[in-house]
Amino acid sequence: MNANTYGINLWVGWLAMAIGIAVVIYLVSRAERDYTQKVSAEDILKKRLARGEINKDEYRALKNMLTQN
């Protein structure tokens, strides 16, 4: 009778481990998606202006192009 109990415990253990691994994979993949930020084109323009890559006139022209579309 104990042999049958050990067999069931073995399968339950494997099942629990598989579920645990699946949960960890799900949480890790979900966390990676949450950290990806959606940056707007206007935010990129502001950063480029702040870094000196474009001047104010270029910034205004590009911003106008974005708002027209």
Image (cartoon, rainbow, N blue to C red):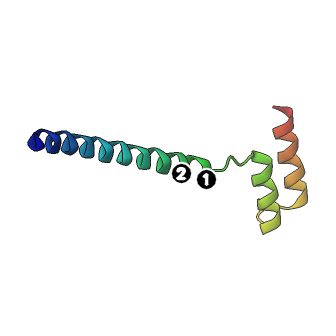
For residue 58, which numbered disc appears in the image?
Answer: none
Q: Are marks 1 and 2 in contact (CB under 8 Å)?
A: yes
Q: Which residue is mark 1?
A: 35
User: In the depicted view, which residue is nearer to us: 36 or 43?
Assistant: 36
Q: Report the Cα–Cα distance between label 1 and label 2.
A: 5 Å
Q: Is residue 66 left or right of residue 57?
A: left
How packed is label 2: few (under 14 Cα within 10 Å), some, or many (20 or more)? Answer: few
For residue 32, which numbered disc appears in the image?
Answer: 2
The picture places residue 33, in percent across and down from the top left corner, at 56, 46
Q: Secondary structure at mark 2?
A: helix
**Seen from this angle, which residue lies furthest bottom?**
51
Quadrant of res 2: top left
The picture places residue 7, in percent across and down from the top left corner, at 14, 41
Name the residue: 32% across, 44% down: 16
How packed is label 1: few (under 14 Cα within 10 Å), some, or many (20 or more)? Answer: few
Q: Secondary structure at mark 1?
A: helix
**Seen from this angle, which residue lies furthest top?**
69
Q: Is residue 43 left or right of residue 35?
A: right
Name the residue: 77% across, 60% down: 48
Amino acid type for the residue under numbered disc 2:
Glu
The picture places residue 57, in percent across and down from the top left corner, at 90, 55
Amino acid type for the residue under numbered disc 1:
Tyr
Q: Is residue 37 left or right of residue 43?
A: left
Name the residue: 90% across, 50% down: 60
Q: Which quarter of the figure is the N terminus placed in?
A: top left
Q: Does 7 sit above or below residue 58?
A: above
Q: Which quarter of the figure is the C terminus placed in?
A: top right
User: In the depicted view, which residue is nearer to us: 47 or 8?
Assistant: 8
